[in-house]
């Protein structure tokens, strides 16, 4: 069993392989390197995913592909938050609120 954290192990794997990979591929390699049995792996997979999301060394690309942030430019990984304004307008929309209320009532009768 490794004395390193799961994200440290993931970082080393990605440095050595020099390529992005799916979360499933990365998790398989990390759990093998860490020496997790299936029960341990099942208990730790969610915290590993969360740790990857929070660790600024990693970047989530399309289709749940992960890579090291240092291999990508800012523009490749930046999300334009101005697109989220549309969703915010919907949330403040009274018609949208009423639709949600009606849907809730229909599902809970």
Image: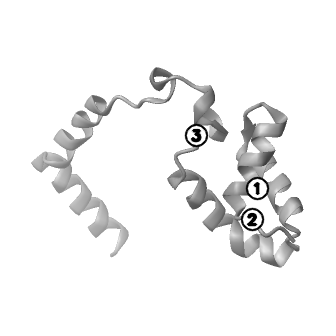
Mark 2 to mark 1 CA distance (whole Å): 6 Å
Which of pointers 2 and 1 lies earlier in the amino acid sequence?
Answer: 2
Mark 3 to mark 2 CA distance (whole Å): 22 Å
Q: Nearer the viewer, residue 87 or 26?
A: 26
Tag 3 secondary structure: strand
Mark carried by residue 9: 1
Residue 68 horizontal/vertical position (percent): 64, 37
Name the residue located 62 percent from the left edge and 58 percent from the top edge. Answer: 49
Tag 1 secondary structure: helix
In the rendered structure, the answer to whether residue 80 lies left or right of residue 55 reads left
Mark carried by residue 4: 2
Q: Are marks 2 and 1 in contact (CB under 8 Å)?
A: yes
Q: How is the image coloured?
A: one colour
Residue 71 horizontal/vertical position (percent): 63, 27
The single residue placed furthest to the left in the displayed view is 94
Name the residue located 84 percent from the left edge and 55 percent from the top edge. Answer: 28
Residue 2 visible somewhere in the drawing: yes
Q: Nearer the viewer, mark 1 or mark 3?
A: 1
Mark carried by residue 24: none
In the rendered structure, the answer to whether residue 86 lies left or right of residue 31 reads left
**Quarter of the figure with the C terminus:** bottom left
Name the residue located 17 percent from the left edge and 40 percent from the top edge. Answer: 89
Residue 61 visible somewhere in the drawing: no
Tag 2 secondary structure: loop
Vertical order, 92 against 34 (above or below): above
Q: Nearer the viewer, mark 3 or mark 2?
A: 2
Mark 3, Cα crowd under 10 Å, few <14 / some 14-19 / many 20+, is: some
Residue bearing mark 3: 60
Which of pointers 1 and 3 lies earlier in the amino acid sequence?
Answer: 1
């Amino acid at each position: 069993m490794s004395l390193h954290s799961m994200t440290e192990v993931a970082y080393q794997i990605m440095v050595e392989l020099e390529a992005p990979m799916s979360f499933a591929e990365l998790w398989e390699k990390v759990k093998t390197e860490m020496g997790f049995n299936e029960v341990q792996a099942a208990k730790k997979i969610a915290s590993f995913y969360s740790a990857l999301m929070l660790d600024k060394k990693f970047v989530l690309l399309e289709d749940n592909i992960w890579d090291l942030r240092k291999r990508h430019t800012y523009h490749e990984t930046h999300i334009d938050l101005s697109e989220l304004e549309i969703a915010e307008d919907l949330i403040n929309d009274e018609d949208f609120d009423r639709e949600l209320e009606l849907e809730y009532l229909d599902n809970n009768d």
